[in-house]
Amino acid sequence: MTNTSRIGNWIKGEVQLPSSDRWLDKFSPHDGRLLSHFADSSAADVDSAVLAASVVFPAWSDVSPVKRGQILGDLVSVMKRRSDELAHCVALETGKSPQDAQGETAGAILQGEYFAGEGMRLHGRSLTSGVPGKYSHTVRQPRGVAGLIVPANTPIANIAWKVFPALVCGNAVVLKAAEDTPQIAQLFAEMTREAGLPDGVFNVIQGRGQLSGAALVSDERVAVISFTGSTGVGRWIAETAGRRLARVSLELGGKNPFVVCDDADLEQAVHWAALSAFSNAGQRCAAGSRIIVFRKVFDAFRDAFVDRARGLKLGNGPGCDLGPVVSRRQQQSVLAAIERAREQGGRILCGGGAPADPSLTQGYYVEPTVIDGLAPEAELCGKEIFGPVATLHPVENLQEALVFSNATEYGLTAAIHTRNVDRAMWFAQRVRAGVANVNMGTYGSEPHMPFGGFGSSGNGSREPGLEALDVYSELKNISFLARAQLI
């Protein structure tokens, strides 16, 4: 990719330039160099994409689910063959290491395989009736145009997470690409054409969320909106799309608790806590950013955890543990949050700033940061910041750990480390979270598992898994009355 490359929209199977001829700049998170210019799309561009999807939707919805699944299977084959290209693009735009980008790409392919297979199932139900001779069953039918809005933290995984279930259900798609990862969306679009997806079934709009994203949400022709991102934007989407009764699926923020009991395997707990807090530079809605530790083992855990954080290698090369955050804007936001925590009484045990290594200073890096001493009501204890920052909190017992875990508006994921099954199940049943993991990290959703949260972490919908079919399809009940003829 050259500094002068331009990334347009993808409409009706081809690249289209923005109607305004306005462009935005994409910079490398690793070293700040200019990577590309991408379309600063307007409402007129969104209108073109939605029109293209609307026109082709009837024909695409008439394709049998089995055939739709076969076409998506062909797309998965293209992704496999070009997986190195996908991973390279992910690494370039996000600053991730090659192994992390390859892992994300493999996850996206697995997601595609699962939902391509749903074309052979797309299950309904047979129902009994109290009326003699009445037979009843349910079928799934597509909603129409699906507006999919994705973030940049795991770009190809986020695209696969939404696009595959939307398409196998028979919807036509307009994807609003993340502002910080425009190229991966265009690369995926090119692969849909190579796989034989009909023109107009999949479209991509680039640009700013406040402009093109808002136009997509407001368009009366868009029947379902799926959004992953901040809680504030999610509330606006729910209000805006809700006024016209569009279906809305929201996967929003998290401030996820990671509980370490006094009987935990501390070595494993430190390992998983570091992965939960710092992998992907902390840019996970499922990041374990609040680490709640029984006082009996607090000092031992804290010392080992800080040692682990200090030993993590920053960079985007092989063997690096975490890369930069995705933008200069995000870096400054994380650093400002750390400074406010310091002012509110937090002790910075390690990290706390941008690295001094000359090879990293031009990028958007933040040192892995561990903070203790904050009061429960401190800003950092309740606000998601999307960076490699974790706070430590001592508690006396499991009841206190549960109260602290639930003391946030969010409820996305949680983890507990203990050797006691009763403790684990007691906590998992009571923690206010859509995902509860035992002796693992706070993340780890798989294609067949539902993911979503309570409270401000979402609106109750779940993606992926079978539950995603409920987002992208209408359930119709069909009944008929048989009049038996005696022979």
Image (tube, rainbow, N blue to C red):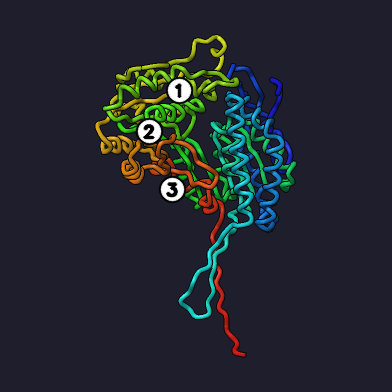
| Residue 425 image position (x, y, % from top left) | 34, 44
Q: Nearer the viewer, residue 237 or 432?
A: 432
Could you say whether the residue bearing mark 3 is in a helix, strand or loop?
Answer: loop
Task: Tell me how far mark 1 sits from mark 2, CA to CA.
Answer: 23 Å
* Mark 3 vs 1, N-terminal side: 1
The circle drawn on residue 412 is none
Q: Position of residue 229 (x, y in %)?
A: 49, 36
Q: Residue at x 49, y 10 (%)?
A: 356
Residue 168 locus on image (x, y percent) = 63, 51
Residue kind at label 2, given as amino acid type:
Phe
Q: Is residue 119 above or below residue 182?
A: below
Q: Can residue 19 be seen in the rendering of this structure? A: no
- Amino acid type shown at disc 3: Gly
Which residue is labeled 1 in the image? Answer: 333
Residue 187, horizontal then vertical, whole percent = 68, 34
Residue 5 versus residue 441 in the image, above or below:
above
What residue is shown at x 46% (from left), y 45% (from top)?
238
Distance, label 3 to label 1, CA atoms, is 29 Å
Q: Nearer the viewer, mark 3 or mark 2?
A: 2
Q: Quadrant of residue 315?
A: top right
Q: For label 2, count other residues whose C-alpha is less than 10 Å away and answer few (under 14), some (14-19) or many (20+).
A: many
First of labels 3, 2 by sequence position: 2
Q: For mark 2, what is the residue? A: 258
Q: Are marks 1 and 2 in contact (CB under 8 Å)?
A: no
Q: Which quarter shows the N terminus?
A: top right
Helix or strand or loop: what does disc 2 sit on? Answer: strand
Q: Is residue 238 left or right of residue 113?
A: left
Residue of label 3: 460
Q: Amino acid at mark 1?
A: Ser
